[in-house]
Amino acid sequence: MGFSSAIEWTTHTFNPWWGCTKVSEGCRHCYAETLSLRYGKGFWGKGQTRRLMSENYWKEPLRWNTTAEQQGRRIQVFCASMADVFDPEAPAGQLDRLWNLIRATPSLDWQLLTKRPERIRESLPDDWGLGWPNVWLGTSVEDSQVIERIGHLVNVSAIVHFLSLEPLIGPIPDLPLSRIDWVIVGGESGPDARFMNPGWVRDIRRQCRTFGVAFFFKQWGGVRKREAGRKLDGRFYNEMPRPENKALQIQNEINARKDRQGTLFPRADL
């Protein structure tokens, strides 16, 4: 999995390893597990060995970064579609290797999505500060039962905080969006897809409008997701976050901290 992605809200996907353990109802019909088993490989479940990726695969983001620099544009990279980068059973040393790769690819926007946001802070590199300019942090929230994930997410400073409400399997009437920059909504797909009520989607769109949050509608899903399409009320919603706005906020916060330090510890006249 990698290279150009079919996922509507990103450009490429990168998986530092394959495998995970289910943690909530959103994982019940995990597409990644199904795909893995299709290849006859079982890397899912507690205590299961995760699949490592090849050396050549790890070089691909370096090539994407070169392309982005040559074309003068940014490339988004979803990490990870076949794993959770904050999995407590991640292969030894692979998360550190991922941070080094992200550091070496400043023209890529790394979209790190997790169902374990409570593990983000303890997993960050020492030089994280108020967030790296090329890392977006996100968490999956399928219904109100796991809404506490949002609090864990926004407690870590980042250039972009985003939510993936996919598969949306229940209403979420009171989303805490005050520190969220982007919301993705999508229905479950596949033979056992659970129903997504259009009213749930419209209510989330309304909440995003109230808070000025970018809204991306990915798909209705279902057994025949292509036929169902991805239009909501007759139009596509492909809104993306504006990291430059957040970067300005972070810089202002840094300047404010410096000003406060200068007040507390004024420079002596020389």
Image: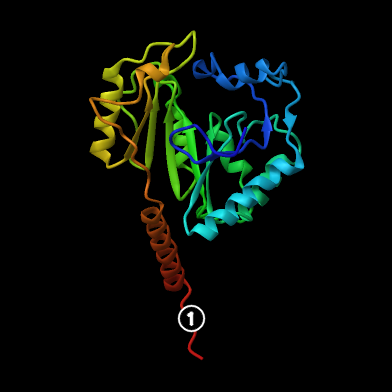
Q: Residues within 10 Å of mark 1 (few under 14, many from 20)?
A: few
The one nearer the camera, 6 or 9, is 6
Q: Quadrant of residue 197?
A: top left
Left or right position of 270 against 103: left
The one nearer the camera, 100 or 191, is 191
The x, y position of residue 68, in whole percent, is 53, 54
The x, y position of residue 253, in whole percent, is 41, 60
- At 37% from the left and 43% from the top, the residue drawn is 240
Above/below status of 107 relative to 53: below
Q: Is residue 180 visible?
A: no
**Farthest residue, direction bottom:** 270
- At 48% from the left and 37% from the top, the residue drawn is 138
Tell me how many marks there are. 1
Above/below status of 132 relative to 138: below
Can you say which quadrant of the picture contains the N terminus? top right
The x, y position of residue 199, in whole percent, is 26, 18
The amino acid on which the numbered mark 1 sits, given as a three-letter code, is: Arg
Q: Which residue is mark 1?
A: 267
Q: Is residue 167 visible?
A: yes
- At 61% from the left and 36% from the top, the residue drawn is 2
The x, y position of residue 15, in whole percent, is 63, 35
The one nearer the camera, 198 or 26, is 198
